[in-house]
Image (tube, coloured by chain):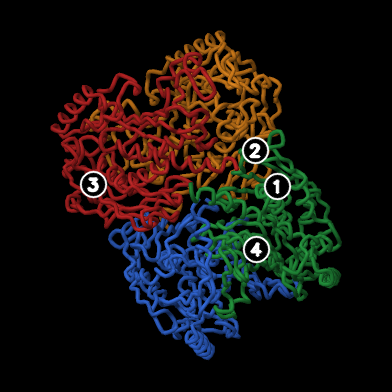
Chain colours: A blue, B green, C orange, D red
Amino acid sequence: MSGNSFGSQLKLTTFGESHGVAIGGILEGFPAGISIDFEAVQKALDRRKPGQSELTTDRKESDTVQFLSGIFEGKSLGTPIGFIIPNTNQKSKDYDALKDVYRPSHADYSWDAKYGSRDHRGGGRSSARETACRVVGGALAAQLMAEVKVSAFVQAVGPISISVPYTELDLSKVDASRIRCPHPETASSMEDYILKLKEEGDSAGGVIQCVITGVPAGWGEPVFDKLHAELGKAMLSINAVKGFEYGSGFAGTELKGSELNDSIESVGVNRTNHSGGIQGGISNGEDIYFRVAFKPIASIKKKQSTVNKSGEQVDLEIQGRHDPTVLPRAVPIVEAMAQLTLADFMLRAKTNRI
Amino acid sequence: MSGNSFGSQLKLTTFGESHGVAIGGILEGFPAGISIDFEAVQKALDRRKPGQSELTTDRKESDTVQFLSGIFEGKSLGTPIGFIIPNTNQKSKDYDALKDVYRPSHADYSWDAKYGSRDHRGGGRSSARETACRVVGGALAAQLMAEVKVSAFVQAVGPISISVPYTELDLSKVDASRIRCPHPETASSMEDYILKLKEEGDSAGGVIQCVITGVPAGWGEPVFDKLHAELGKAMLSINAVKGFEYGSGFAGTELKGSELNDSIESVGVNRTNHSGGIQGGISNGEDIYFRVAFKPIASIKKKQSTVNKSGEQVDLEIQGRHDPTVLPRAVPIVEAMAQLTLADFMLRAKTNRI
Amino acid sequence: MSGNSFGSQLKLTTFGESHGVAIGGILEGFPAGISIDFEAVQKALDRRKPGQSELTTDRKESDTVQFLSGIFEGKSLGTPIGFIIPNTNQKSKDYDALKDVYRPSHADYSWDAKYGSRDHRGGGRSSARETACRVVGGALAAQLMAEVKVSAFVQAVGPISISVPYTELDLSKVDASRIRCPHPETASSMEDYILKLKEEGDSAGGVIQCVITGVPAGWGEPVFDKLHAELGKAMLSINAVKGFEYGSGFAGTELKGSELNDSIESVGVNRTNHSGGIQGGISNGEDIYFRVAFKPIASIKKKQSTVNKSGEQVDLEIQGRHDPTVLPRAVPIVEAMAQLTLADFMLRAKTNRI
Amino acid sequence: MSGNSFGSQLKLTTFGESHGVAIGGILEGFPAGISIDFEAVQKALDRRKPGQSELTTDRKESDTVQFLSGIFEGKSLGTPIGFIIPNTNQKSKDYDALKDVYRPSHADYSWDAKYGSRDHRGGGRSSARETACRVVGGALAAQLMAEVKVSAFVQAVGPISISVPYTELDLSKVDASRIRCPHPETASSMEDYILKLKEEGDSAGGVIQCVITGVPAGWGEPVFDKLHAELGKAMLSINAVKGFEYGSGFAGTELKGSELNDSIESVGVNRTNHSGGIQGGISNGEDIYFRVAFKPIASIKKKQSTVNKSGEQVDLEIQGRHDPTVLPRAVPIVEAMAQLTLADFMLRAKTNRI
């Protein structure tokens, strides 16, 4: 069974190689009668597109989505929403030199081992370009949940991180900095750090935190499809992600039960929220928050040692226009995957009782 | 759609409340003609069962699995393997006091919010007792992959952790300590720490690491069902888990691309393994390793403040026989979920090419 | 992917070989808070069980279902309903002679070709005994749709058939005859015909019609999961079924569009119902009706010519206790599969609009 | 869960309304390394397209498929194959008069009841235009099974039918007649009959038979996903289909077991083939054959009585360019759905044993 779909009730299936004719997808299970806000979709895509600032790649891609079906006179029909994003700026030539070379820490070798061949141009299907389709899906999913607000931001870049909890941040200010960090001084340090690495032909990793408000109690489908398990899968399916934690996460493992338990103030209200808004895999009505670890992008200009298909040692200096960090562009991707996950659970919850 | 199944090609569906007649499951997609090692299944269950040492609950449960179908004359038939584990030691009375009380950091309130009611006895469906079925499924799945070895162990308990990498540990010695930590001195400190908390009526969290050898290159189904994304979901679906990281994980986000990239020595062989055996969501033939964060168990004897269904404040001192830590018993559960995930991908890979 | 599940929102997965320890299943997606009518389930099973009259096999099986989970204090929990039906009357010895012989028009050879082996006792997994689990699932599904009435009956046995449309029959009288035909004279002829064949060691086929009232407009999920497409699959998945038609069926192909179109009297009301209550794959609020073709049962006492696994010609006289016709016992199976199909669509429709 | 996908291992998901921007689909699970025969795909589409002869509608649609992904340098990549077919000849104006009118025996009312609205232009999503995507999928699926030959033909039109069994027909001659009937005299009568109805503003139904050779023993996944059950669902999901039978079908229900059983000549070889190449839901290596009942097309020029949304009685004379019969154009659709079904089972069988 193919792994190109996400969601069970609201299901996004994507297709497309980074340098093929187009990428695109089908969003199934979107209920009928919803007025579609097309601008919101395009705005989400614009936050993901390359070329936004000197912190990202120079590539210019318009990433304009074309809706082909499922919407009529501005409203959803209940039928599948098909859409495409043409690949307009495909400098395939840039990649000819990479045809037979395995790039370190990329999917080149594992992909070849699996399928016997691959579209080597720009990573083909393994390129993060595919995530543009997720952003379209997420922006539509968000329109099913007016009361839910999903806010992601860059919490750490390399060794530099925000030192205050999210509750002390103004999450409406995320886009005020190019790095999408709502803590101005930290943002400034992060940007300096990235620009220095860019100059060195190197790249930076970091952590994105995501905060979700407005989810009612009752979403999530134990025992396997726990809300945080699907959120975790959603995040881990994003390129370059190496870890996921929610609520008290890894740090909380060092505490005692008596320290970590959220004591209950009244029905549905806890005094603390170490649980991260999810208990037993089901939302409890409080804020949901989680952190996602992104490794530094593997495509760097610095010379690296590798081999080609014939097994010959070659030195590699990756040309082309690569991001020094994936983080600011990954913020809308994290949000999109969270939106898809939540909307799916919202719909799934509709049959828990009749 | 219900969330009670795991896997797509090899699918485990479980049922059962902790204090109902029985728990059980169906394992579908298990290929025909495999000689079943029943002892291996029982041995895995015995590693998970309560009452193994003073580090775990005093409850004694035999947890004997009864296979009902899918196996004939010792071999798999290719048909669904149905099995049950009777609930033999159900002291439901112990739970009468909890009928209307919401336990802090448990699934009581969220479950009620979702379904309108719940089986309150011992957590019902939200109890970790359900994981016994996963252990059965995992022990069977393992028998499809003779060459694959899955080894989990306790790496940290509270603030105490092993300080050396897994490559310096003897993973055949995991069961030499009651806490299932293969580093003897650390194991000893961990046990002291837990026993102290037990005395205080408190509980401890920690981290389980899992190392997998023998997986060939080519398993994993991008773009959504990446190998590490499904492993992450598998782990996050286990009770009390708050985080998952693989390869370089969260720590690696602080490094530069030039530091973290695994330089390639020859086709299929890297000089380092920061990638954790997975690149682009597909196994690359090297060791797979990941870490799983477990919070301290929420059921503690210490007095806690909470409310009942009517919203009245009540003090709660949870009686009954609870574990001071979930960690040693969670080791076989982590292994089982990894085995189910891997065997599923092994079967899925069979149609990548024809 | 295994083919042992039916339904997407309300999903029944069954397991079990006819002469194994037990058959059983898991019903997932059953909403919480429904008071379960256990007697209704057992009554449906009793209508399917062998030994009801001389028209069926002499085998006596109690077919008592044991619910293991998903129900608490008489109400559904929203969790998976696990159940088993022990195989109490397994005369496996009866089948030893058949171990290496391929029975004509049975699944013996095709099953061996697929899996390399099979449980030969009583057909193993290919036995119609498995349908007892479907009857359990259907009887539960029916309890989700109080307004929907599913009535199946035997319309034809061999060349003998009811000559009037269902609208002229009293469907509350189906069980008044042993053959489950609500037209008394036809029933009598049918029974005579079957008893004569039984004496000859032969078997009879026939047609079951099913009529469904009370389904509101709007159930069914085009374009692939049309209501009649899933009903068709449901019926064709029953042992011995060779055909399915709904509404005007095969006979209607001979008419002209102007003759067959249902002219519309008022919104939601047609003057005729050649459409069979389904238009474009979606229920339109009128009666749904369809016919199911059952071949004569393949197990006959008459001597037949066949081969064994070694390819040697052997004569076969099937001993054991077989039904001369499957029809009266198939009536509750047809109903069960219709109930499962309809309840699934009822739940699926809950997310068409929000 | 949406009903817009077909298949589990090889999965086709389609999207598109008949008068939207484009229709299209994603074919997932197509193995890597297959050289794609693009001409074969276009040829199949050409057999389905309107305007082929005076037996079909006058509408001219080029129906040119554009592949967007999943194929690189002429070979499949193992990634999703995305494709679109632009809607080039959308005379939406033709349908303005129908905006508020329910057409008899169409999906207009049931669709409105389900979703609250619909794209009324040309039937929108309920239009048979969607089947062009199935033909693309089927033509690709066929390329995975070089040894399998799927041949459909028109066996009956209204009361006129071929009187000899398929074994006496030359199935390479199906396209020799415009009606796609390989029996020349019958074809001629059929065409006369259709042209007469066309003149009257009426429409004809009929039966398509399909014969499949080259399927090895072992395809099909009991107990629910029997080969004939999925074939039946596949056929019943095609617009205007009212019935499905395979092997001995409805006619065989009148025979005795001793007459109908296929006596076995040698291992894997029967003397007759009443079973239709499928036993117990699994192919047995012999010819698979089945019949599909198509009702006369509901869009007729003759005046009909109906109502509009407000409940007012209106007379309806459907203008526009409609087919007098769906049969010759449905032949490639039947083949496509059979090809998709079979290729799916071929891939599913790959994990029955390891």
B129 up-or-down from C133: above or below? below
For the residue pair D81 and D201, the one nearer the viewer reads as D81
| Amino acid on which the number 2 mark rests in the picture | Gly
Left or right, residue A120 beside residue B133: left
Distance Cα–Cα, label 1 vs label 2: 27 Å
| Amino acid on which the number 3 mark rests in the picture | Val
Q: Which residue is mark 4?
A: B287
Report if residue C53 is visible in the image. Answer: yes
Instruction: Pinpoint residue A290: horizontal percent, then vertical percent.
Output: 58, 72
Instruction: Pinpoint residue C42: horizontal percent, then vertical percent.
Output: 62, 32
On the same chain, marks 4 and 2? The answer is yes
Q: Which residue is mark 3?
A: D101
Distance Cα–Cα, label 4 vs label 3: 65 Å
Left or right, residue B51 beside residue D221: right
SS for callout 3: loop
On the same chain, marks 4 and 3? The answer is no
Q: Residue at point 58% right, 85% down?
A: A160
Residue B33 image label = 2
| Amino acid on which the number 4 mark rests in the picture | Asp
Chain of the residue that carries numbered disc 3 in the rendered image: D
